[in-house]
Amino acid sequence: MTDAVQRAQSDSFWEEAVGSARAVAAGDLVLVAGTMPFTGTVLHGEGDPHEQARAAFGNALAELERFGLGPEAVVRTRMYLTHARDVDAVCSVHKELFGAAPPAATLVIVSGFVDSRVLVEVEVEAYRGATST
């Protein structure tokens, strides 16, 4: 078990504005904050929930890589969508990424995000336990 709390920042404007970290490792857990389908200021998959889910999860998993973890370490996911019609598209990405080691998952329909073009935001939590570096 790692005792120190480690914080990781990304290039997200919102981290600075809110005063938050993209990911926090505390002991055996690594928590990745709500992640949208952006790289810098570029939105990926505008209007396409499948591509937005792929980009958002890709961003979240990239943060886990900083701690030496991959999708198999993910124990919980949260998916926030603006439209129920997008459930199948987003779930297909989730299953593709995590189907080999399914995490506990929550999917919620929300009224919107700070950027109205965003259809999907995700959070992941991982357990590093014995794989801790």
Image (cartoon, rainbow, N blue to C red):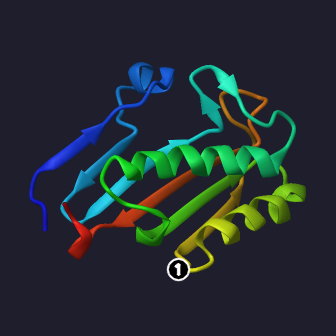
Work out which quarter of the rendered image holds the C terminus and state it: bottom left
Q: Position of residue 12 (x, y in %)?
A: 49, 26
Going by the image, does 22 lie left or right of 116? left
47 in relation to 16, above or below: below
In which quadrant of the rendered image does the N terminus lie?
bottom left
Residue 95 sits in which quadrant?
A: bottom right
| x, y percent for residue 28 | 23, 66
Q: Return the residue nearer the eye: 100 or 10.
A: 100
Q: Is residue 131 left or right of residue 106?
A: left
User: As drawn, which residue projects farthest toward the left?
Assistant: 3
Q: Position of residue 82 (x, y in %)?
A: 78, 46
Label 1, secondary structure: give it: loop
Identify the residue at horizontal 26%, vertical 52% (top origin): 25
Q: Quadrant of residue 132?
A: bottom left
Q: Name the residue under label 1.
A: 101
Q: Which amino acid does label 1 sit on?
A: Ala
Number of numbered markers: 1
